[in-house]
């Protein structure tokens, strides 16, 4: 019995090394498969993951966005947002007709909300560039079905991952475009209706899946 135990104790460590090497090889193979599948989701709008090798369509779209941003002011300034400083009231107070009850409290103008307040001057400038080319292309569609609108948007450089809520509404087709870049919240709300097609800016969630937070639909 002693003679048999000796050789087993000598070769047992070698077996553990071979087993560990086999497990390591399997783990590396599994990791490679996971990275390959996960890479399909990289580089989507609003995502923090950057694609290592963007598709030609994604590269063309990014070049388009970069060109528009270079032609627009720096982010952060919003000339549309009220400063909060009230102007002196130079108008004469309205007179109260006999029998009417004066208001208990002064009526203040409602504070504006929506894209006017939440988007800065850079967003509005970038949006105008996108809107001009999209509207011109949609006006050429005599029969703006959802399929034709998607094809038109793809031809302008907007990939499917940026097109949302594409739905035909009678003779019109409505859609949203995700134009978020570098933490921005810009999106577009559009309606394809031939000569009366229109596209206006909207506000999307800053991060995560595309979700419209504020809009004034055309």
Image (spheres, rainbow, N blue to C red):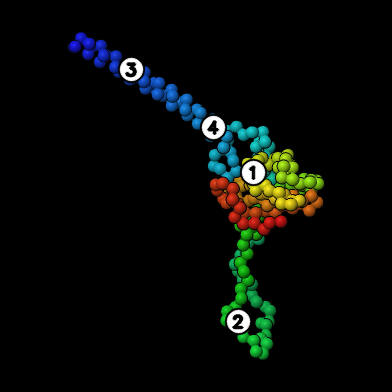
Q: x%, y% of residue 59?
A: 66, 36
Q: x%, y% of residue 197?
A: 76, 52
Asked if residue 66 can be seen in this view, the reply is: no
Task: Point out which mark residue 15 bears.
Answer: 3
Which comes before the other along the chain, label 3 or label 2? 3
Q: Quadrant of the N terminus?
A: top left
Nearer to us: label 4 or label 2: 4
Q: What kind of element bears circle 4?
A: helix
The residue singled out by tag 1 in the image is 162
The residue singled out by tag 4 in the image is 37
Q: What kind of element bears circle 2?
A: loop
Determine whether label 3 and label 1 are within 8 Å by CB. no
Q: Residues within 10 Å of mark 1 (few under 14, many from 20)?
A: some
Which comes before the other along the chain, label 4 or label 2? 4
Q: Quadrant of residue 78?
A: bottom right
The residue singled out by tag 2 in the image is 103
Residue at position x 62%, y 57% in the image:
214
- The CA distance from mark 1 to mark 2 is 50 Å
- 214 versus 167 height, above or below: below
Residue at position x 65%, y 37% in the image:
58
Q: Is residue 33 left or right of residue 198?
A: left
- The CA distance from mark 3 to mark 1 is 53 Å
Q: What kind of element bears circle 1?
A: helix
- 179 versus 41 height, above or below: below
Determine whether label 4 and label 2 are within 8 Å by CB. no
Residue occupying the far front of the picture? 170
Which comes before the other along the chain, label 3 or label 1? 3
């Amino acid at each position: 019995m002693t003679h048999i135990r000796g050789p087993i104790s000598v070769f047992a460590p070698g077996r553990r090394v071979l087993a560990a090497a086999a497990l390591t090889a399997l783990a590396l193979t599994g990791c490679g498969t996971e990275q390959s599948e996960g890479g399909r989701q990289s580089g989507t709008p609003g995502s923090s993951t950057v694609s290592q090798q963007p598709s030609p369509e994604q590269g063309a779209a990014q070049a388009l966005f970069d060109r528009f941003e270079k032609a627009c002011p720096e982010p952060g300034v919003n000339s549309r947002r009220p400063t909060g400083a009230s102007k002196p009231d130079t108008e004469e107070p309205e007179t109260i007709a006999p029998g009417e009850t004066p208001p208990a409290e002064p009526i203040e103008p409602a504070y504006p909300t929506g894209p006017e307040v939440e988007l800065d001057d850079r967003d509005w400038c970038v949006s105008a560039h996108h809107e001009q080319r999209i509207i011109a292309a949609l006006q050429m569609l005599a029969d703006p079905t959802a399929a034709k609108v998607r094809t038109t948007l793809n031809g302008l450089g907007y990939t499917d991952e940026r097109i949302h809520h594409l739905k035909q509404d009678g003779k019109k087709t409505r859609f949203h475009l995700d134009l978020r870049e570098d933490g921005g919240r810009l999106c577009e709300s559009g309606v394809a209706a031939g000569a009366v097609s229109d596209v206006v800016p909207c506000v999307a969630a800053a991060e995560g899946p595309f979700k419209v937070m504020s809009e004034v639909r055309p």
